[in-house]
Amino acid sequence: MSIPASEAHAASYRAREVPTPAEVVDGVWAIPVPLNGHALRYVTVFLIETAGGLVLVDAGYRHPSCWASFQRSVTSVGHRVEAISTVLITHNHPDHVGFAGRIREVSGARVVMGQADDFATMHAARGDFLGQLGASLELTGAPRAVIDEMYADALTVAVHDENLELDVVLTQDREFGFGDVTIRAVSTPGHTYGHTVYFDTRGLVFTGDTMMAEGPTQLAIVSRPGDDPAGDLFRSLDRIRDLGAAIACPAHQYPYGDVAARAEQLKAFHRAEVAAAHELAHGDATAWDVARRMTWKKPWAELGRGTRRFCLVHTLALLRAQP
């Protein structure tokens, strides 16, 4: 468990409550955006005050309640949405890209994201999200009835417009200057293939979903022969460790210190997962065979259907990695 940067924020998370907006350090605000009816409860976006305008990291769900909550929170900390100059998106999941286009309409902000997560690029190279999920489920070796059921369940929860057009597509690491603040975009695939963290050179790293304070990282969907999201993640964790950040600001849970130690801890956890998966993969065992024998938070038979889908796809990714 990591060292919270804010005990109040961590306490709210552990109490399963939505925290109030809070200043992580001077001029950097954690803005929780409630996800009504969602098990995650909220996603945290970060508002950074700079001489070059406000910078936002991630953009919640595209839902009227999320947009209204975000506007209220920005006002409550003394700012205006119209003053946002740039939206830096860590990855293309719906709770991160949601109202980025709406902000651009209101403020003229430029929207930035990694190339592999740019929807136009992703569609051309991999297909849409549901297409990738379908291909991944086929690769797991699960029975046809299970694949069909899991895919049908995904149709009800994967509400993803996948039509956001970017102003800046990151093809490599890049520094952005915002007057008195410098933020470096650092490619960190693993959770998605184009995941990017943003390192504020004053000592903060905005880690998206790559490295949270507690628990594992959900690995990207395997749908192509060369995909190895676990291997990607190990390299990405090394990159984050070596940034020298004092505080990590993830999109879920709470900001925390001991960043390098957390990177090493998470890498060790997932390496152990890879080893366990390969140990169970004797002969012609499939990801479906292995997933049902892996150790999860609950026994396989007690997991909900959605959690089983995540575990199955995650297991496929583990088996792609070198043990």
Image (tube, helix red, strand yellow):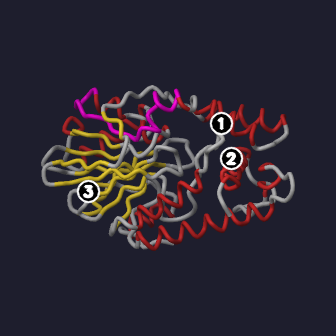
Of the residues tagged 1 and 3, which is closer to the observer? 1
Region of the chain picked out in magenta, as a range:
105-124
Is 283 above or below relative to 100? Answer: below
Label 1 with label 2: CB-CB less than 8 Å: yes
Q: Gap between marks 1 and 3, in whole Å?
A: 36 Å
Side of 135 where 256 appears, left or right? left
What residue do we see at 30% from left, 42% from top? 72
The residue beneath circle 3 is 28
Label 1 with label 3: CB-CB less than 8 Å: no
**Mark found first going from the N terminus, 1 or 3:** 3
Name the kind of residue labelled 2 in the image. Val
The residue beneath circle 1 is 133
Secondary structure, mark 3, is strand
Quadrant hosting residue 241 = bottom left
Is 132 above or below relative to 51? Answer: above
Name the kind of residue labelled 1 in the image. Leu
